[in-house]
Image: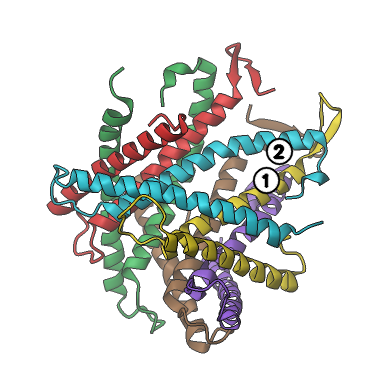
Chain colours: A purple, B cyan, C green, D red, E yellow, F brown
Amino acid sequence: MDFTQFNDAERKHLQRMMEQKQMSDFFKMYNTIVDRCFNDCINDFTSKAISSKEASESCVSKCMDKFMKHAERVNQRYAEVGAEMMGGPK
Amino acid sequence: MDFTQFNDAERKHLQRMMEQKQMSDFFKMYNTIVDRCFNDCINDFTSKAISSKEASESCVSKCMDKFMKHAERVNQRYAEVGAEMMGGPK
Amino acid sequence: MDFTQFNDAERKHLQRMMEQKQMSDFFKMYNTIVDRCFNDCINDFTSKAISSKEASESCVSKCMDKFMKHAERVNQRYAEVGAEMMGGPK
Amino acid sequence: MSFFMNSSANQTVNMQNMAMAEQELDMFTDLFNRIVSSCHEKCIPKTYIEGDLNKGEAVCIDRCVAKFLEVNKSVGAKLQQISGAGPNA
Amino acid sequence: MSFFMNSSANQTVNMQNMAMAEQELDMFTDLFNRIVSSCHEKCIPKTYIEGDLNKGEAVCIDRCVAKFLEVNKSVGAKLQQISGAGPNA
Amino acid sequence: MSFFMNSSANQTVNMQNMAMAEQELDMFTDLFNRIVSSCHEKCIPKTYIEGDLNKGEAVCIDRCVAKFLEVNKSVGAKLQQISGAGPNA
């Protein structure tokens, strides 16, 4: 987005909006990780006692770590390639 | 959510908001059921006449019943386990 | 939706709302096409050079054309069947 | 509180009705997007040999939309039967 | 700017807190919908022989919800550990 | 009606432009989330042996993002060609 088209008051307005969205984006990402790692790691519902608790916890833990590193890397590339592709030099 | 942190005016505000969301949540759940039961039950597009109409209707009908009972049960457990896990006694 | 229940001021309000939604609907559809055609057409990440660039571009291009014609046709049927089914003659 | 006067027409705009109309509109848009997605899955093969819809795909789409809306109708009927106050579909 | 007086009660409504509460509420609704969807996928076979939940399905759902919320808890704990300010889940 | 004066700066805020900027922002967020999801599907195996990205996964992600944005670009070009007024992507 080209922010030079906006005046100060508008930029302030947009910044407030983006700050508010940040939290809902965080919540959404949080639920996405839970959803993804639950679905990839937890497939045994035969016992109430989470018999393989350690195993599944370890899977969830690794899944979470990997997801965050994945999203972080996508974010870097998105910023680089996106800037190059969409904005380009003016 | 801990409602004791809000004053009366804020609680009233939140309640109005929740009432409004209730309808859109209902609509979303409604579309989710249609989507799910269509995709699970309807797989024959070779004839215009819904040749196996009774069969598919019966599948849709059972699918719908089961989905609602499923969501109801999730809701119960969500409330129980969630309360226990997230809030805990104060 | 039955618009006869609304007064002029309300109709104006709704129209403004629908105009605003049009753009976000367009954006959503745009991202849906990209997502769909990327997932259906691009499956080779072994080389940086998009070796089969022409091939994949051609797939993406056809996928996009087909998706838009598909959505257009769904829109026509949705309007026809939907009108018949939901509203019916008054 | 949820009413205000429209200066040009001197008519009140019932904001609660506006919010309900907006939600109904969103529901129809969501329904449409789900039909597009489900019927694409059911009718369009993932090998894109041509950009046009062929006869078989077109016919499949028509039936798919009709059947989706039929399912929508029976779910709606059942929900109304249960809750006494489903959406007017 | 993000405060206004409520005429009836003379109490200020902190709009920023209201927005945060709304987002938190939306998060719980989203979480609930994801559990419904994931546990339906894991516990309910796509052949609908009866409209009722049978014993096996019911038990599966109970465990599924509990395990989903456990995953939610461990992800939350880890996020808080990392960021120092995760959601209070 | 869709303009108001900002008390501090005496500048008008064009609410329609603000709404458009918000929608554009939402579109980029949606795009980002779709890339995260699609590239996770394409590049990360569901067996989580380690918490770190290995070399192959990292390289796959880089190419995946680049190719996704390329598809985004060609779809955008085509839409603009057709409608004459696509998003400025």
Evaluate if marks 2 and 1 touch, with contact meaning CB atoms under 8 Å apart: yes
Horizontal placement of E89 versus D31: left or right? right
Image coordinates of residue F58 in percent, x first then y, are 52, 82
Residue B20 image-quadrant placement: top right
Q: Are marks 2 and 1 on the same chain?
A: no
Report the quarter where the N terminus of chain F lies: top right
Front residue of this view, candidates B43 and B70: B70
Q: Which mark is residue E22?
A: 1
**Residue lying at 62% horizontally and 35% vertically, measured from the top left:** B19
Image coordinates of residue A31 in percent, x first then y, are 58, 62
**Which chain's residue wears label 2?**
B
**Residue lying at 56% horizontally and 60% vertically, measured from the top left:** A90
Cα–Cα gap, marks 2 and 1:
8 Å
Image coordinates of residue E67 in percent, x first then y, are 57, 68
Amino acid type, callout 2:
Leu
Front residue of this view, candidates F1 and E48: E48
**Residue lying at 49% horizontally and 39% vertically, measured from the top left:** C21
In the rendered view, tell whether residue D29 sits above or below residue C12: below
Q: Element type at marker 1?
A: helix
Image coordinates of residue C4 in percent, x first then y, are 43, 17
**Which residue position holds label 2?**
B14
Amino acid type, callout 1:
Glu
Horizontal placement of F12 versus E63: left or right? right
From where the camera sits, is residue A11 visible?
no
In the rendered view, tell whether residue C65 sits above or below residue F15: below
Q: Element type at marker 2?
A: helix
Few, some or many residues within 10 Å of mark 1 (<14, 14–19, 20+): some
Few, some or many residues within 10 Å of mark 2 (<14, 14–19, 20+): some
In the rendered view, tell whether residue F51 sits above or below residue E72: below
**Which chain's residue wears label 1?**
E
Q: Which mark is residue C87?
A: none
From where the camera sits, is residue C1 visible?
yes
